Image (cartoon, coloured by chain):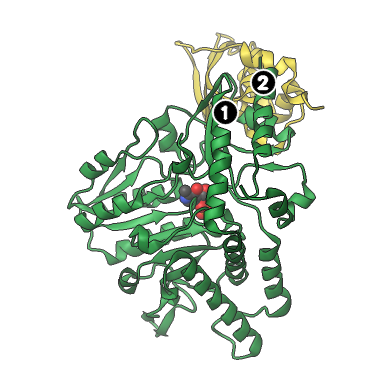
Chain colours: A green, B yellow
Amino acid sequence: MLDTATIKKDFPIFESSPALAYLDSASTSQTPLLGLTAMDEYYTKYRANIHRGVYELSEIATDKYEQARETLARFLSAESEEIVFTSGSTLASNMLVYSLEKTLPLEKGDEIVTTIMEHHSNLIPLQELASRRGLTLKHIPLTEDVDLDYEKARELITSKTKIISVTLASNVLGTINDIKRLSELAKEAGAILIVDAAQAVGHMPISVRELGCDFLFFSGHKMCGPTGIGVLYGKKERLASLKPSLFGGSMVERVDTHTAEFASTVARFEAGTQNIAGAIGLAAAIEYLSRIGLSNIEHHVRDVTEYALSQLRSIKGVTLYCAGDPRKNAGIVSFLVEGIHPHDVAEIFSRGQVAVRSGHHCAQPLMGALGVTALVRASFYLYNSKEDVDKLVLGIKKAQSIFA
Amino acid sequence: MDEELYKQNILDHYKHPHGKGVLVDFDIKERGRNASCGDDLTLYIKFDQEHKVRDVAFEGEGCAISIAAASMLTETIKGKTAKELALISPGDIYNMLGIPISPGRVNCALLAYKALNDSIKTME
Ligand SMILES: Cc1ncc(COP(=O)(O)O)c(C=O)c1O
């Protein structure tokens, strides 16, 4: 286990709220001082736009921004020309789908395969694409123990499949999906594989090479980075032919009155002034996480999750809706307390300074598959300890006594 | 202060809501949904010859606040005319609940009220 007392000192939020059991990192994580300082430095010492000015500040800012790209590349075992900065997962997902629509030969009747556990931000752009182009959208279902049904996946993925888009880890179930296995199916089918890694990057070691995906995206704010920054990774060969779908300054080679030619580099996908401080803050967050060690973080979260699962299983009236094997769970425990609506559970928790989320977690098709309308979700990260889980358990008991 | 939100009155309405059910014969059937938490209820109203609420019922799922508010609402609107229904305001709902409603719970408190309000608008 990590020494959470020491780790908490790196996060100013726990100085302002020492008693806080923050169990909502799957929604957004907290920010280490290191990241805040890095962003402050940009704003106070070398703020300027990038790739534009010929003066020194602009050169420094450009360097730092490009260094951030390199940090991201190293972190994901990618190359810097494969890293596109976006404002987050949602933009990455939408932008990518539009770009693929312009790039791929898509014909009526072609198919897209996704899963029943997707976040709306991955799912809806696919639905929209399917309806614009007359494609068929198919969903890989769950097995009894909320794993993906890989047998069904094998049946669903065919030569008609052009795009496969799946989450690496479910933001509700915590389930970690076997991307390598899906990548093999994608290769056989000749389909493009997109991975939504919003719940995974920064929580476990990730190598895009090992996963074997064509594209992968995530948000900085779920991995100790600031809000408003995220990354779209694209495999070099794929990115090279991908057409841009956002247009503006900084992404062009040449523009005349009626046409434009676009940059041949990743700049093609970064139209307009970017979140420069955000990229710098994200790189600092990665530096921070790497210092602690991604494997250490993964194991720590696994231990806390295991403890939470066993504690919650022992409370009468609590039903779990998440991956029951901590080795296959990204640190997310969703549950219901019998007779008490998740909203009320979360509100009672909040009075004990336990922050969790309640609701459908932007995954309504999954809620439907599970036969629920809402769930309480506790999610764990490097600063959480077993004491936080104990507070959660106390909260459940309190809710049960109020509603008894 | 701590237990304020879940004082007995609210819990009683939640556990034994008034007007829980459906009307087969109705003049109004309106669904209210809370996008953020998945709460979903349907309000039914039947008027008598004098255009006063003769019967009212709701069915659906929700948290203690939304169910208690719906339950209280069904109690208060019986016998009221459509015009009188239109005069009910969010403030009246908060007063009925008699507890402080935080910004995060406003949509819960007003779920049934919004269904009522929408249905009256469509009637006019
Ligand atoms: C699995 C998953 N994908 C995508 C997103 C969307 O991320 P963002 O809101 O940062 O764009 C989330 C965030 O909740 C998520 O959990």
- Residue A312 is labelled as 1
Quadrant for residue A77, please give it: bottom left
Amino acid carrying mark 2 in the image = Glu
Query: How far from the left and from the top, in percent, is residue A78?
Result: 42, 69
Residue closest to the eye, A137 or A337: A337
Q: Report the residue that reaches farthest toward the bottom.
A: A54
Residue at coordinates 35% horizontally, 43% vertically from top-left? A115
Q: Is residue A200 visible?
A: yes
Disc count in the image?
Answer: 2
Q: Is A228 located above or below residue A324 in the figure? A: below
Residue at coordinates 55% horizontally, 39% vertically from top-left? A305
Residue at coordinates 53% horizontally, 77% vertically from top-left? A66
- Residue B84 is labelled as 2
Q: Residues within 10 Å of mark 1 (few under 14, many from 20)?
A: many
Residue at coordinates 66% horizontally, 18% vertically from top-left? A403
Establish whether labels 1 and 2 are both on one chain.
Answer: no
Q: Is A44 located above or below residue A310 in the figure? A: below
**Chain hosting mark 1:** A
Q: Secondary structure at mark 1?
A: helix
**Chain hosting mark 2:** B
